[in-house]
Image (cartoon, rainbow, N blue to C red):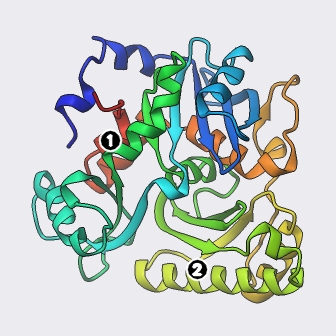
Amino acid sequence: MLNGNWLKGLPGRAFERRRSARAQVGVYRSAVHLIAARLRSEDNGAVVVEQLHGTPIGTGSDQEACQRLIHSGIFQKAAVVLALAPDQYTTHSLPSPSVPDGEMREALRWQLREVLPYAPEDAVVDFIRLARVAESSGPPGLLVVATPRRTVAHAVAPLLAAGIEVSAVDIPELAQRNLLARLPGSGAGQALLSVDQSSGLLTVIANNELCFARRILMPRADVMEEEDPEHVAMRVATQIQRSVEVVERQSGLPPVRTVWIGPHAYAALISRCTAEQTGIDCPQLDLQAELRFAAAVPLLAPEMAAGALLAIGAALRSERADTASIKATQSVAPSWLARLKAAA
């Protein structure tokens, strides 16, 4: 559990103020854009996307991009959740060690010592218990998250330098979990594939709990144009099929009924190929059709659509929802994912 310098200087009652905030902003930095989504929570539990902005980073600094977002007013009186970029952390699927929860992180740090490209003592290590049927044999599965402390400090630094307080740091796997839980059919097994310039992220939930997450490599944008789109879509469909089979075999959970395909130039092809190969319903995700958007929210350019999905998912993060899921899985909230501040 992180403590000491990581939370040094945190204002008293700051967490209490943020929990009661009616608006929350999710921020995601893609390879070339900084994207922010502002969501307002209503008394009935519904959420409304109030603002959605993206700005290119280009040759400028992240702090300059933050300043452009600040001028839009998107951060005013809102808690801010930052979703890390794929190259800022690694995930590892591991069986749960037979140790008390209080010793789990150090046990996992020891297990990862051979695979981390940096000193384990320099890593922030945490875990998420993956959903499965209670009767499953063998130790429960964990999605273990590791990142260098300096990487997280570097990720939040531009926001802090621009005067934006970061109340939580999350990962795209959980951002997609949050979004999936809001889509129709969330009570059954379903999956979401988001695709960016270099990879796809497939997440699977059952009863609103994360049970599987996997990165799928995609051809680079400059190479993709030279490949037959049908072949690219078929390769992605094969990876989805294999992943779904792994989920059903290892977790014992009900079959995945729906695979949502996120925005991408090949979304229609991937959807069709996956449906033909798996027999699963594969709708293309239209965020504006599935979530409530304020009338004034403009559509972002297509190249920012995948990042917008993750920013919205980060903004959907709920302390109360996380607490409920933690109780159900007898886990402890990953402290660095929940309250991480910049290193002192």
User: Which residue is labeled 1 in the image?
Assistant: 336
Say which mark, if any, is on residue 72: none
Q: Nearer the viewer, mark 2 or mark 1?
A: 1
Neighbour tally class for label 2: few under 14, some 14-19, many 20 plus, Cα within 10 Å: many
Q: Using the rendered image of the protein, determine whether residue 131 is visible from the camera's viewpoint.
A: no
The residue that appears at 10% across and 64% down in the rendered structure is 99
Image quarter (top left, top right, bottom left or bottom right) of the C terminus? top left
Which image quarter holds the N terminus?
top left
Along the horizontal axis of the image, is 213 left or right of 32? left
Residue at 82% across / 82% down in the picture?
273
For residue 244, which numbered disc appears in the image? 2
Q: Amino acid at mark 2?
A: Val
Q: Residue at x 82, y 69 (%)?
A: 222
Left or right, 217 with reference to 138: right
Q: Nearer the viewer, residue 7 or 275?
A: 7
Q: Is residue 168 left or right of residue 10?
A: right
Q: Position of residue 149 (x, y in %)?
A: 31, 45
